[in-house]
């Protein structure tokens, strides 16, 4: 009933929040390395990235129309945007345009991620509320059953104590002078076992 409290490490809390910035920064760094290694003003490389970006966008549209899976569609469009960003950052000379695109891509990534984080948080809160309600319900049932079982035990104990006291009273009464077993039976009292009757 009582679950252990697990404290999450601070890296586990921060890592999902830093993921969009890490992703866009990684794309920018790789694009600038590619730029330094011959992609600057290369029409062929720019055309390749344009085709790849358009293909990823088309895959997102196709996935949205056929499956309707929002995660798959979001992944395809994110890949399309990353490829377009890498193509421009690799083709352009200087840093102002790549940095502007990096800031826009990071802001867009956080805007999309915030939506999923809100949905995930809402689902988590709803699940925790449901689990808490079920736990309270079962705890109430458990308390009622415990009270019921305790009551039955006490009733059984009381009945056993009464029977023991009655048997002890009959045995004590049988040792007194003038005890008449037949008079007791005529009065409608419980019949004594045969062993006690013979001893009387």
Image (cartoon, rainbow, N blue to C red):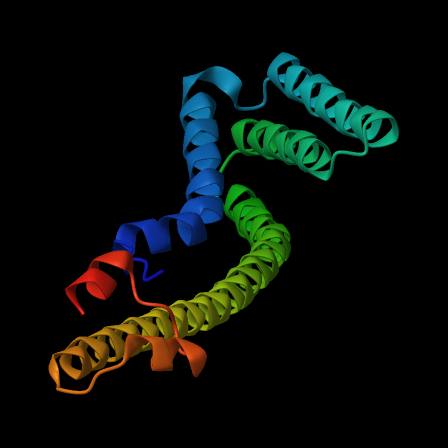
> Foreground residue, 50 or 10?
10
The residue that appears at 21% across and 82% down in the rendered structure is: 169
Identify the residue shown where x is 13% and y is 85%. 176
- Residue drawn at the location 60% of the way across and 27% of the way down: 87
Give residue 6's quadrant in the image.
bottom left
Q: Is residue 24 positioned above or below 114 on the image?
A: above
Q: Give the total of numbered labels.
A: 0
In the image: residue 108, left or right of residue 14: right
Which image quadrant: the C terminus?
bottom left
Image position, residue 106 (x, y; %): 54, 50
Q: On the picture, is 57 further left or further right than 131?
A: right
Q: Position of residue 23 (x, y in %)?
A: 46, 39
Pick the residue in front: 130 or 185: 185
For this orientation, the residue located farthest to the right is 65
Task: Report if residue 6 is visible in the image.
Answer: no
Which residue is located at x 45 percent, y 22 percent? 34
Query: In front: 167, or 149?
Result: 167
Image x and y of residue 15, in percent: 37, 48
């Amino acid at each position: 009933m009582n679950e252990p409290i697990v404290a999450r490490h601070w890296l586990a809390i921060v890592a999902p929040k830093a993921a969009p910035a890490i992703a866009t920064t990684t794309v920018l760094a790789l694009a600038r390395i590619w730029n330094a290694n011959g992609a600057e003003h290369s029409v062929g490389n720019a055309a390749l990235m344009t085709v790849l970006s358009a293909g990823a966008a088309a895959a997102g549209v196709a996935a949205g129309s056929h499956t309707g899976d929002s995660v798959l569609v979001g992944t395809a469009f994110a890949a399309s945007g990353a490829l377009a960003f890498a193509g421009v950052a690799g083709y352009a000379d200087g840093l102002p345009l790549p940095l502007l695109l990096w800031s826009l891509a990071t802001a867009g990534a956080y805007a999309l991620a915030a939506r999923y984080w809100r949905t995930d948080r809402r689902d988590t809160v709803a699940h925790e509320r449901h689990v808490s309600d079920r736990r309270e319900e079962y705890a109430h049932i458990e308390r009622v059953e415990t009270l019921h079982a305790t009551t039955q035990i006490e009733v059984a104990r009381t009945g056993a104590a009464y029977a023991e006291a009655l048997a002890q009273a009959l045995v004590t009464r049988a040792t007194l002078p003038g005890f008449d077993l037949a008079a007791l039976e005529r009065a409608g009292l419980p019949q004594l076992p045969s062993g006690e009757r013979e001893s009387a």
